[in-house]
Image (spheres, rainbow, N blue to C red):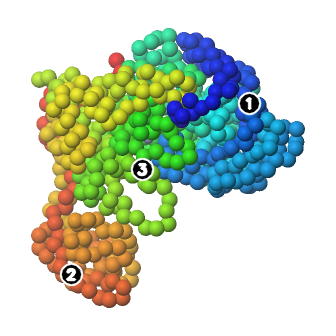
Amino acid sequence: MIRSSAWRRARGWRLGAAALVLAVIALRLSVPTGGQSTAGSTDARVRYTVSVPEPAHRWMAVELEVDGLGADPLSLRMSSASPGRYARHDFAKNIFMVEARTAAGEPLEAIRTTPTRWDIADHDGSVVFYYRIFGDRVDGTYLAVDPTHAHLNMPASLVWPAGLETGPIEVRFVPPAGEPWRVATQLFPTDDQLRFIAPNVGYLLDSPAEFSAFVDRTFEVTDPSDSTYRPDFRVAVHHGGSDADVDRYAADVERIVREMVAVFGEFPRFETGRYTFIADYLPTAAGDAMEHRNSTVISAPASLRTQGRALLGSVSHEFFHVWNVERIRPQSLEPFDFENVNASGELWLAEGYTNYYGTLTLQRAGLASLPATLGRFSRAIETVRLGPGRRFRSAVEMSRLAPFTDAASAIDPTNWDNLFISYYTWGETLGLGLDLLLRVRSADAAGVPSLTLDDYMRLLWRQFGLPGGSTPGAVDRPYTMADARAALEELTDASFADEYFDRYVEGREVIDYVPLLERAGVAVVPTALDQAWLGDPSLRFERGGARVTRPMPFGSPLHLAGLDRDDVIVSIDGREVSSAGRWSETRDRLLPGRSVTLTFARAGELLTARVTPEEHPGLRLVAFEEIGRTLTSSHMRFREAWLGSQLD
Ligand SMILES: [Zn+2]
């Protein structure tokens, strides 16, 4: 996924080999029907062999052979960032037992000049670099090795040769003795099913691999705008369930693919003619999902049999990334910096709109119920509307915090509860809001709109996604914030686009969803009528009272009363609160607007304060018919055009 212009400009001494592979790729891609293209044989001068001789011990061996080198030292790098993940990760920490030699076997010295870099001088034009790497986390970001599989995220697994980024690379997988493991990956296949080609280092690092005895299914979907283009879709599942579970899951994945392509009207040209879903549903897996150019990795500590439909949200989100982020790509992620991190102000669109379409597509495909969909939208709107972080930063500024918040780790406490609102969530509400604003302003008397967010996405696709890239994995025309605004202006007018961007995207206002949702026969109602509200603190109940365990939400009654983390609330209005039951009993006796005395312990001292409960601020979305309101035919048509299937 690297689209590094610096890398594209890098010395092209092996352009001959690259051109050969690209010619083969181009030739195969010109075959209009389905079926996967293969890269055939190459004379790649960068070759990896990955093997797992002792999977029980959670390490993998990597042998990297490079030849045809000039006189300069070879500099090998380990990534600190991974495509689709926005925080810094020190993947080099797990490397051990490093050795280097020439192809003829003469020992070489590999000097670790920085924590993530090995330099090798005095070679004879060839270097064989061997290392072992520990990995024990099954997700979309790291490496996991165990007796059931090797699950590779490439930046967490492979060092790469600086200066040789543009040439083809071969990767060969060696299974543990006697294991019938196969490989699911977006790497270009060859006629040997354990040997693959990457056209460049960026594509290699963007190509995760599941190496195991997984179960797979494939299906073809004809491109809606070109009946001769039928990419195939592979669903590779590593799990402990039955094949019937995989059949059901693959059928649901197919419904998502068919429904989602209707938004754009066409598939991108997948470079290998195939898109691969790699799913690991294992007790040992962490919940994660990561988009890549022609594949995704999805993991969860879950079971397809019991949680099948609940696992489709991440499938739907990741598949939308095929267009939005993988091809409609913000300039701020270009070039992707594997050795540092990119900060992007556009993640509210790249991730947030993707979240919105993830939810919307499940509803449109009949894979989620209306109450479930409205529940998701409710939670997103409430998170943004009530989130203290909105006092401080816009959705654009929240996006730029991703390097600190996207699975980043730190040992000092943070106050994200108050200072951060996820750009996934905020962006989801911005997508929902823009969709409804466009629909309402363009709807005819019958409730049918002539302009929707789908039109906006299609326009972005035509302007920025469709032009493609000069090499596999590259995006030659990424967009800027100004481009996104100009595209909306093109679709509507300057005042509409400026209002949306100035007030809601770069500003901190919340769209008024109430009149917009009314058009779809959806009402906004209080979650807890007449209930007094203190601010939903995080509490741990202990013998002396209720201990506040997280930073107190800014502006909430308890925050205004001066309480914060580690204070122990002993009593409110004379009633003790040392259990969840007593806490809610006490709260239910309070009246909004009537101040009461609160006793709390802080660092061994007993203190008192006055607190004034407020009306519970929570709201939720509910369909008219659920609360006895009349649904007119205009409501129904508006709702059907929005939430109904877009397939003919
Ligand atoms: Zn995403």
- Mark 3 CB lies closer than 8 A to ligand 1: no
Mark 3 nearby-residue class (10 Å; few <14, some 14–19, many ≥20): many
Residue 466 in the image: above or below residue 507:
above
Quadrant in the picture for the C terminus:
top left
Measured as percent of width and height from the top left, residue 318 is found at 46, 37
Residue 634 in the image: above or below residue 122:
above
Residue 532 in the image: above or below residue 427:
below
Mark 1 nearby-residue class (10 Å; few <14, some 14–19, many ≥20): some
Measured as percent of width and height from the top left, residue 315 is found at 47, 37
Identify which residue is drawn at 11% across, 70% down: 593
Is 543 displayed left or right of 31 in the figure?
left
Going by the numbered disc 2, the residue's amino acid type is Ala
Q: Secondary structure at mark 1?
A: loop
Which residue was labeled with disc 1? 45
Q: CA distance from mark 2 to mark 3?
A: 37 Å
Identify which residue is drawn at 16% across, 59% down: 529
Q: Secondary structure at mark 2?
A: strand
Q: CA distance from mark 3 to mark 1?
A: 36 Å
Question: Which mark is drawn over residue 609?
Answer: 2
Going by the numbered disc 1, the residue's amino acid type is Arg
Query: Foreground mark, 3 or 1?
Result: 1
Mark 2 nearby-residue class (10 Å; few <14, some 14–19, many ≥20): some
Identify which residue is drawn at 21% across, 81% down: 609
Residue found at the far front of this picture: 71
Query: Foreground mark, 2 or 1?
Result: 1
Q: Nearer the viewer, residue 363 or 201?
A: 201
In the rendered structure, which disc, 2 or 3, sits on the residue that comes first in sequence?
3
In the rendered structure, which disc, 2 or 1, sits on the residue that comes first in sequence?
1
Q: CA distance from mark 2 to mark 1?
A: 72 Å
Q: Are marks 3 and 1 in contact (CB under 8 Å)?
A: no
Identify which residue is drawn at 33% across, 49% down: 397
Which residue was labeled with disc 3? 402
